[in-house]
Amino acid sequence: MSHTILHIDSSPMGARSVSKKLTQQVVSKLTEKYPDTHVVYHDLSTEILPHLNGEILGSFFTPKENHTPAQAEAIRVSDQLTDELLAADVIVIGAPMWNFNIPSSLKAWIDHISRMGRTFKYTETGPQGLVASDKKVIVVSSRGGIYTEGPAQAFDHQESYLKAIFGFLGISDVSFVRAEGVSMGEESVAKALKAAESHLAEVLLTA
Ligand SMILES: Cc1cc2nc3c(=O)[nH]c(=O)nc-3n(C[C@H](O)[C@H](O)[C@H](O)COP(=O)(O)O)c2cc1C
């Protein structure tokens, strides 16, 4: 059965990026496991998505048949990104921690795929995710410090945010391949990469 992976990177660090190296490994292991795999890729550090402006928001909240030519143009990117999300079986995301959160390039992508009526809706009993719940998200999380224990735990608005937003859209299966402490010296980097390797092996068991 054909398998579609949506692979999103957001680090601009090129060959030095920890998250990029790890997302590549995740995708290549998944491709080994499912040979008939189609990969859709975006590097958000070079493919700069527009922030949601008045035109784009206007296009979201106006029925398609009433779109002005400018609105029809403005919604194109968001429609394509949302179609890609809805068509994917697995979504692999490279998410460095930046200022305790995700890079704004990745946030811009999330703003484009969080679409009322397409990926979520509000009901009388509260919000409901519209993305098929059998999808799997694998987040590669790279961060300079340590947030899984110790005093900085409350500063993690990166992994907690990603889990929350994908849950909101209907995907509860969000797992993390984590390399943390990569700015804390060589020993810490080695430990981080070893931990990420074991998270990767674990994630692949159920992917
Ligand atoms: C702009 C910027 C902001 C950062 N902010 C944080 C931070 O708030 N907390 C942290 O632990 N590390 C922070 N770091 C370190 C990165 O999370 C770390 O270098 C990580 O490896 C980046 O992922 P990458 O190697 O894939 O680019 C920051 C790095 C940059 C470039």
Image (cartoon, rainbow, N blue to C red):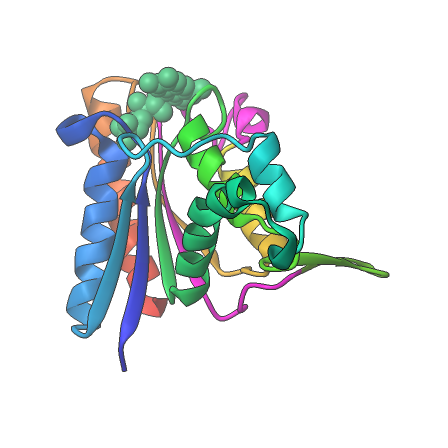
Relative image position of residue 56 (x, y in whole percent): 56, 38
Does residue 120 appear to the left or right of 32 in the view shown? right
Q: Among all residues in the image, which is located at the extreme bottom?
A: 1
The N terminus, quarter of image: bottom left
Q: Which span of residues is magenta-colored?
A: 129-157
Q: Residue at x 24, y 53 (%)?
A: 26
- Relative vertical location of residue 77 with respect to residue 64 in this rendering, above or below: above
Relative image position of residue 46 (x, y in whole percent): 26, 31
Q: Residue at x 65, y 59 (%)?
A: 117
Q: Which residue is drawn at 51% across and 25% down?
A: 150
Q: Which residue is drawn at 48% across and 34% down?
A: 107
Relative image position of residue 49 (x, y in whole percent): 40, 34
The C terminus, quarter of image: bottom left
- Relative vertical location of residue 71 with respect to residue 27 in this rendering, above or below: above
Q: Is residue 144 visible in the rendered structure shown here? A: no
- Residue 146: in magenta span: yes
Does residue 120 appear to the left or right of 179 in the view shown? right
